[in-house]
């Protein structure tokens, strides 16, 4: 059942929440062995006990919080007080955060229930959820395929019906990619709209937490809850929270006609099946809006710039993992710090993480910094200026979210460059900080997604087009049989 | 001839405090060659020097708040107790100097 319906249901009878909890846990019991969407599942008894506390509080005060009882899957790089948060890594296998991320405080303040931490690529470094140190997650629509990544557990939990709604994080496409591959809606908000406090950092200048859902309304609902200024995140934008549901309703009422830019290179560079499905999807609204072809000539270069910056920032961010205050433990008695730290980091990090830290150190080292890192940052400014110029002519830009359908498990390991180049559509919004959304576009035997990018803080526009397309495609509230 | 020579890998291992196994070394050499070739695509973009590096999409200075304590002092080390090795309220760490 969609979240907006659950709210109505529980507002008429709050005790119905227990049937709902049972149904989610039954579903998890039936499919989780095959899907592996979660790293940690909160025991049902704890969820019951938490809900009983909320019920008692509601009974005494005469009202229940707005999203009372709605169960949410949270990506395992978002700190949850008292619930293990591993970041998909052996390094943090036993780490229990002593505090909640700001977004988690916000979820709890409206009565939502975190029932599990979803699987992810280790430290969000990957696009398939296969670099998780625990196990790969499988795509509920086809168990031989990956669910995308790095928020693949969140996408899979939604597609398998193991969660009603989910949180992901997106650095180079980690919300949009799994959303496309699991047939759900996923939004990367404008950089700074959602607090990163409590998000375990990968590449701080691009990391963003965002909502994932099975329909546009739920997506808008969750964005409303998690967005807003936070003093504890110095990059948080000093803006008042807005009600995205209301903003969406207003746009759907007014139905403004927009100019949609079709990103030529990204359509042309995609697999035939993907191109056909995404063209056909966008075509459904081109008779109402105006669609024009636009060009962004630097695609491979954008991928290069993204990986240089991400790896450079990762090499600095992940220097904090030394096993002393938290993280993997090794014997320290009588040993020097270099030996201890080296052992912790060598045992705690998986191969992909080690490689990215080493490459990040390489591009920041003497002789290479200007050649790679600074050059990538110059490219980032140029790309932003070009995008700004394009947004003076169009309201949104459309492309396939992923240029290829979900690969088979293990397929990308044969050539890691292929996996990086598959981020070609998603890194553009990441580098520039612009909001972008994945909208389920259709099937080519496998799920295919359409991406829209828009101007900073124009999330209502993205939600508006998403809702229009959802109405036409009817691709909403889909749950795979598994 | 790989971009990552054995000497360069050892240098990066010292900087990152991470060791690669023999198998990982072979793999990383091959992969880094391909990845750095991708990075070199940026060399073909003309006129980049006229753009200032964009370190952060919001080019604003770090906001500072008044220097006043907001949280209670964590005398019990509750922030660390589930995760660090504590001895008499101190975190046990390796020696910084050895003989």
Image: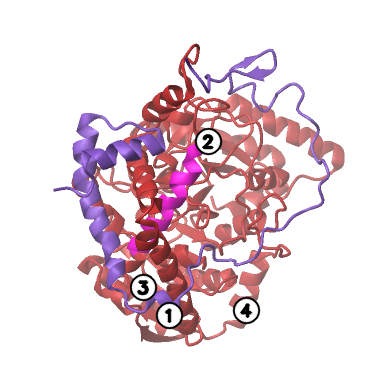
Chain colours: A red, B purple
Query: On what subunit does the disc labeled 1 rest?
Result: A
Q: Secondary structure at mark 3?
A: helix
Contact between marks 1 and 3 (CB within 8 A): the answer is no
Cα distance between the residues tagged 1 and 2: 37 Å
Q: Which residue is mark 2?
A: A116
Instruction: Spot the residue most to the front.
Output: B99
Query: For the residue carrying disc 1, how many other residues have a C-alpha within 10 Å: few (<14), some (14-19), or many (20+)?
Result: some
**In x, y percent, where is residue A65?**
74, 46
Left or right? Give the position of A114 relative to A323. right
Q: Residue at x 55, y 62 (%)?
A: A189
Q: Which residue is mark 1?
A: A285
Q: Secondary structure at mark 2?
A: strand
Of the numbered discs in the image, which one, if any, rests on residue A320?
none
Q: Which residue is mark 4?
A: A253
Q: Which residue is mark 3?
A: A281
Q: From this viewpoint, is residue A426 visible?
A: no
Q: Earlier in the sequence, mark 4 or mark 1?
A: 4
Query: For the residue carrying disc 2, how many other residues have a C-alpha within 10 Å: few (<14), some (14-19), or many (20+)?
Result: many
Question: In the image, which residues are magenta?
Answer: A303-319
């Amino acid at each position: 059942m969609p979240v907006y319906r659950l709210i109505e249901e529980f507002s008429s009878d709050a005790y119905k929440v227990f049937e709902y909890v049972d149904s989610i846990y039954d579903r998890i019991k039936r499919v989780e062995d095959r899907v592996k969407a979660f790293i940690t599942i909160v025991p049902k008894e704890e969820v019951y006990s938490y809900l009983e506390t909320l019920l008692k509080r509601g009974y005494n005060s005469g009202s229940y919080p707005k999203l009372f009882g709605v169960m949410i899957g949270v990506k395992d790089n978002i700190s949850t007080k008292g619930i293990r948060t591993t970041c998909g890594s052996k390094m943090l296998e036993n780490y229990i955060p002593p505090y909640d991320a700001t977004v988690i405080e916000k979820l709890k303040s409206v009565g939502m229930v975190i029932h599990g931490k979803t699987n992810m690529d280790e430290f969000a470094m990957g696009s398939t959820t296969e670099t998780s140190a625990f196990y790969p997650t499988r795509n509920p629509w086809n168990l031989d395929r990956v669910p995308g990544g790095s928020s693949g557990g969140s996408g899979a939990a939604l597609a398998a019906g193991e969660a009603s709604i989910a949180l992901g994080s997106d650095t180079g496409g980690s919300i949009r990619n799994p959303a496309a591959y699991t047939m759900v809606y996923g939004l990367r908000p404008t950089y700074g709209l959602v607090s990163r406090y409590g998000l375990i950092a990968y590449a701080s200048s691009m990391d963003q937490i965002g909502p994932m859902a099975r329909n546009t309304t739920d997506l808008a609902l969750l964005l409303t809850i998690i967005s807003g200024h936070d003093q504890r995140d110095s990059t948080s934008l000093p803006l008042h929270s807005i009600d995205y549901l209301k903003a969406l309703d207003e746009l759907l009422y007014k139905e403004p006609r927009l100019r949609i830019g079709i990103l030529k290179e990204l359509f042309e560079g995609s697999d035939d099946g993907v191109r056909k499905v995404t063209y056909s999807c966008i075509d459904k609204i081109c008779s109402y809006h105006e669609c024009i072809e636009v060009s962004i000539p630097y695609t491979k270069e954008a991928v290069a710039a993204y990986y240089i910056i991400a790896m450079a920032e990762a090499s600095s961010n992940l220097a904090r993992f030394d096993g002393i205050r938290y993280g993997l433990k090794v014997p320290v008695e009588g040993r020097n710090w270099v030996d201890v730290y080296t052992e912790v980091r060598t045992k705690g990090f998986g191969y992909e993480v080690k490689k990215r830290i080493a490459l990040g150190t390489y591009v920041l080292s003497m002789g290479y910094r200007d050649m790679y890192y600074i050059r990538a940052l110059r490219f980032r400014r140029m790309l932003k200026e070009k995008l700004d110029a394009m947004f003076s002519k169009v309201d949104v830009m459309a492309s396939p979210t992923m240029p290829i359908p979900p690969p088979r498990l293990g397929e990308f390991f044969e050539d890691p460059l292929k996996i990086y180049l598959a981020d070609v559509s998603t890194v553009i919004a990441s580098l520039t900080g612009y909001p972008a959304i994945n909208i389920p576009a259709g099937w080519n035997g496998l799920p295919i997604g359409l991406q829209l990018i828009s101007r900073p803080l124009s999330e209502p526009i993205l939600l508006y087009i998403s809702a229009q397309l959802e109405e036409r495609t009817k691709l909403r509230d889909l749950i795979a049989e598994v | 001839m790989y971009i990552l020579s054995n000497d360069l890998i050892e240098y990066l291992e010292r900087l990152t405090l991470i060791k690669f196994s023999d198998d990982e070394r072979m793999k990383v050499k091959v992969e880094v060659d391909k990845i750095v070739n991708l990075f070199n695509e940026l060399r073909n973009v003309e006129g980049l020097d006229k753009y200032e590096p964009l370190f952060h999409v919001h080019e604003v200075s770090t906001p500072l708040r008044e220097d006043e304590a907001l949280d209670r002092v964590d005398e019990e080390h509750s922030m660390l107790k589930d995760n660090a090795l504590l001895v008499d309220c101190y975190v046990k760490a390796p020696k910084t100097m050895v003989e």
